[in-house]
Image (cartoon, rainbow, N blue to C red):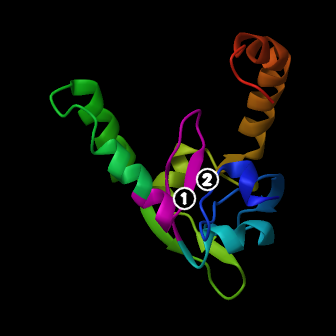
Amino acid sequence: MSKEAFHLKAGESRIVLIGEFNHTLDKKGRVIVPSRFRDELQDRFIITRGLDNCLFAYPLGEWSNLENKLKTLPFAKAEARAFMRLFFSGASEVEIDKQGRILIPPMLREHADLSKEVIFIGVSNRAEIWSKEKWREYSNKSNLSYEQVAEKMIDFEF
């Protein structure tokens, strides 16, 4: 991919996580991070509660960017405070071990209903971690409306 495709300045790089990968959660709550994601996520990254019953995984630099954006939310609004509390209280820094695994904290495994089979998907600047069952349900439902959603995004060019 050329840097021009992302409108980058000279010397800048951009994280792009893409693809779908199946892995297995062990009894201790560890899962192998897809090798294609390890370069982008690096040795340490942040996982937190995601939307739609998944987990979001951010490289540290992307997490910092997101944190700065979230700091601009209106503190006086109850919804903004609630979102920030839930989002940040659910966050955990994880480290990839020598076998390429991370330990997902119990609270986050519960949030995403992770038990045995896990799906990692790349979503541009973040990875998402789903239970296989929840991902299949979501993607089957979303595939039905994929074209409808695309049609509604008339200002977006592919």
Where, quadrant-wise, is the N terminus in this rendering?
Answer: bottom right
Identify the image quadrant of residue 22.
Answer: bottom right
Q: Which residue is mark 2?
A: 126
Queried whether the magenta region covers residue 88, the answer comes back as no
Q: Amino acid at mark 2?
A: Arg
Who's the residue at 70% across and 72% down the image?
A: 38
Residue 58 tag number: 1
* Residue at disc 2, secondary structure: strand
Q: Residues within 10 Å of mark 1 (few under 14, many from 20)?
A: many
Where is residue 4? Give x, y as percent.
Answer: 73, 54
Who's the residue at 52% across and 68% down the image?
A: 45
Queried whether the magenta region covers residue 47, the answer comes back as yes
Where is residue 51? Give x, y as percent.
Answer: 54, 36
Which residue is at the front of the view, 39 or 47? 39
Which residue is at the front of the view, 109 or 46? 46
Residue 30 tag number: none
Who's the residue at 82% across and 52% down the image?
A: 19
Lower sequence index among marks 1 and 2: 1
* Residue at disc 1, secondary structure: strand
Identify the image quadrant of residue 103.
Answer: bottom right
What residue span does the magenta drawing correspond to? 45-64
Where is residue 119? Give x, y as percent.
Answer: 76, 51
Mark 1 touches mark 2? (CB < 8 Å): yes
